[in-house]
Amino acid sequence: MIRNHLTFIIVLPFLLLENAAAKIIVDCRVVTGGITECNPYGQKFVKVREIKYETNRHKLIAAKTLPVPPKTSIKVISVEDMIEKYVKIEEPVRFKGTEPITIQPVISKETQKERMNSRIEKLRIHRRVLLEKMQKIKEEKERKKQEALKIVKEKEEKKEETLKPAQKQVIQGGYYVIEEGDSISTIAAKFGIKRSTLRALNHLEKGAAIRIGKKLIIPYSQKRVDTIAKAEYIVEAGDNLGSIAKDFNLSSDAIIKLNRLKKNAPIRIGQKILLPLPHKLAQQKAEQKRLLAKHKKERLAKSRSKKVKKYTYRSKMIHGFGKRKLRVTATAYSSHRRQTDNTPFLAAWNNRIRPGMKIIAVSRDMLTRYGLRNGSRVRIGGLPGYYTVRDKMNKRFRRRIDIYMGTNRRRALRWGRRSVMLYW
């Protein structure tokens, strides 16, 4: 009991000293105006290592305390100080009030003159630099221009050199008369020369038109020009198939094949030899194609005439009229634009028709295959009288006739489409 009281008596002075020291510096949470320092640790922040209960009282007693940390003082800065130190205040832009305005000092005339002279000197230097640059650019352009002119001149000289041999040959050259279907390209290919050379010799511009009958200068002799144009060569003394083929850049076998000669057959002076030149071969091919088409057309016409005779000459009379009969599809039409065309009273072969006429239109095969003609008289099974062929139908119809009903459209519609026997 006595020991406990002694412990309390020993600890108490320390607590009192701590409280007194804490009261010297005000707590930072209750800082007011005029106080420059404060204690960040209050009274209740005293650190205790060991706490004991008092005997029979159950009160807490701080037995051992830790050393008090050094007191850190915090300097209190007022708002005015903060504004002066950290906030930068600028003068207003629009209105400065009645504050005095500082006037710039007056510059003397000598200073102004010196500054002007310095500016003029700078401008002179700048102008000199610009003039030098412009002079360099001008010299570069002139150099490039001279180089381009030199290149053009060299090209012209080369072109003249290439044309000189051709111009020399023109003195002994020949003329070619333009024929139907010729052009600058075909003529140049025929004689084996360039189109530019041909145009230059005849002073023709690119794309210029040529007309039939006009003469063109060819850089070969007249004899050679005529030979190439006709693709025919007249044998002279000392010629053979090999020399002729070499002279015209051909093969001996092609010449033998075109002229139907034997391989080692001799040739005589004055003999005409056909040359297998490209334009001659193309001409022969076109001629063969034309002859084949002509023969085909003749054979077709001959076969059609035989078929017509087969059906035309029949000996049996049918119903006392005509020698032929055929079942056809019969329709009817009238003189209306919807059923004919813009000329409803004008039929094929320029036949004029009018209501009341007994006429028919027939399909094209009835004309070519079955022997009907413009003006042929026919009879239609089931209808009285005779009808005359005055019109023809569209080529898409086969074995068909169209009966004319005048302007009675309703009658034509009632007729419709029927299968009838046609006699002629």
Image (cartoon, rainbow, N blue to C red):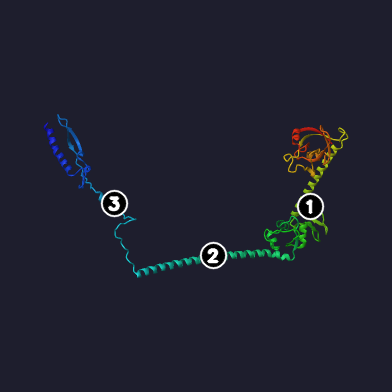
Mark 1 and mark 3: Cα distance apart in space: 114 Å
Q: Position of residue 77 (x, y in %)?
A: 24, 49
Which corner quadrant of the image does residue 69 belong to?
Answer: top left
Quadrant assignment for the C terminus: top right
The residue where tag 3 is placed is 86
Q: Amino acid at mark 3?
A: Tyr
The answer to whether 101 appears left or right of 205 in the picture is left
Camera-nearest label, 1 or 3 = 3
Identify the mark nearer the N-term, 2 or 1: 2
Find out whether the residues at labels 2 and 3 contact each other: C-beta distance under 8 Å: no
Disc 3, SS = helix
Quadrant assignment for the N terminus: top left
The residue where tag 1 is placed is 258
Which corner quadrant of the image does residue 358 belong to?
Answer: top right
Mark 2 and mark 1: Cα distance apart in space: 64 Å
Mark 2 and mark 3: Cα distance apart in space: 64 Å
Q: Amino acid at mark 2?
A: Lys
The residue where tag 2 is placed is 141
